[in-house]
Amino acid sequence: MTDVSQPLNVLFLCTHNSARSILAEALLNHLGRGRFKAYSAGSSPRENQKPNPLALETLTHAGVSIEGLHSKSWDEFAKPDAPQMDLVITVCDNAAGEVCPYWPGQPATAHWGYADPSEGDASDDHKREAFRQTLHMIRKRLEIFVNLPAASLSHLSIQATARDLAKHEDAA
């Protein structure tokens, strides 16, 4: 990010783009105060994939807008007319291990792993709590990120900054 008047474009990746990446996209757009523009995508979203209803419910209960959120393939962001990303963050271990498409502009990359709150056969109440906890962990990291000085978000230091944030503990 060289021009402070331009927002920093951040892409959050997960396998299906239905839970963690959706939470991160919405939350960064909420917290970013115009300094950031967040997007999300999946390495292999299922046909007709939609955001997990519990993810949307969790965001709504947290006062975060869900307008415009939808599941999409990461291929959309490798197209020539796609917005150029400054930072690409994987939020699940599966997507972190996959070979990503070529991203125009060679953005910085980082991995912030979170357990899948939608996984398993738990009750909806248990999953709601898992989504709430995941949103809380993402929020803690993003609050640090959005409050970094502009110098920490320069093209040369953004990758190190984002990777250092991955080391922060997510204690409640």
Image: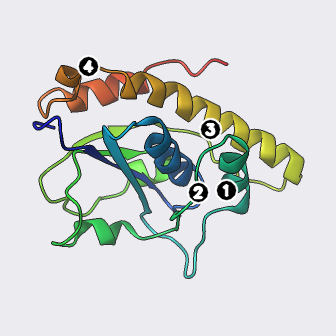
Indicate left or right for 31 with 147 as reference: right
The x, y position of residue 109, in whole percent, is 27, 41
Alpha-carbon distance for marks 1 and 3? 11 Å
Tag in front: 2 or 3: 2
Alpha-carbon distance for marks 2 and 3? 14 Å
Alpha-carbon distance for marks 2 and 1? 6 Å
Tag in front: 2 or 1: 2
Say above or below: 57 vs 43. above
Which residue is disc 1 drawn over?
56
Q: Are marks 1 and 3 in contact (CB under 8 Å)?
A: no
Q: Which mark is residue 135?
A: 3
Q: Are marks 4 and 1 in contact (CB under 8 Å)?
A: no
Residue displayed at 65% across by 42% down: 63
| SS at badge 4 | loop
Tag in front: 1 or 3: 1
**Amino acid at pointer 1:** Leu
Residue displayed at 73% across by 55% down: 54
Q: Which mark is residue 66?
A: 2
Residue 91 appears in the figure: no
**Amino acid at pointer 4:** Pro
Pick the quarter of the image with the N terminus. top left
Instruction: Name the quadrant containing residue 165.
Output: top left
Q: Are marks 2 and 1 in contact (CB under 8 Å)?
A: yes
Q: Return the disc, 1 or 3, that comes first in the chain's sequence.
A: 1
The x, y position of residue 126, in whole percent, is 85, 44
The x, y position of residue 169, in whole percent, is 53, 18
Q: Return the disc, 2 or 1, that comes first in the chain's sequence.
A: 1
Alpha-carbon distance for marks 4 and 2? 28 Å
Q: Which mark is residue 149?
A: 4
| Mark 4 burial class by Cα count in 10 Å: few <14, some 14-19, many 20+ | few
Q: Return the disc, 2 or 3, that comes first in the chain's sequence.
A: 2
Say above or below: 89 vs 57. above
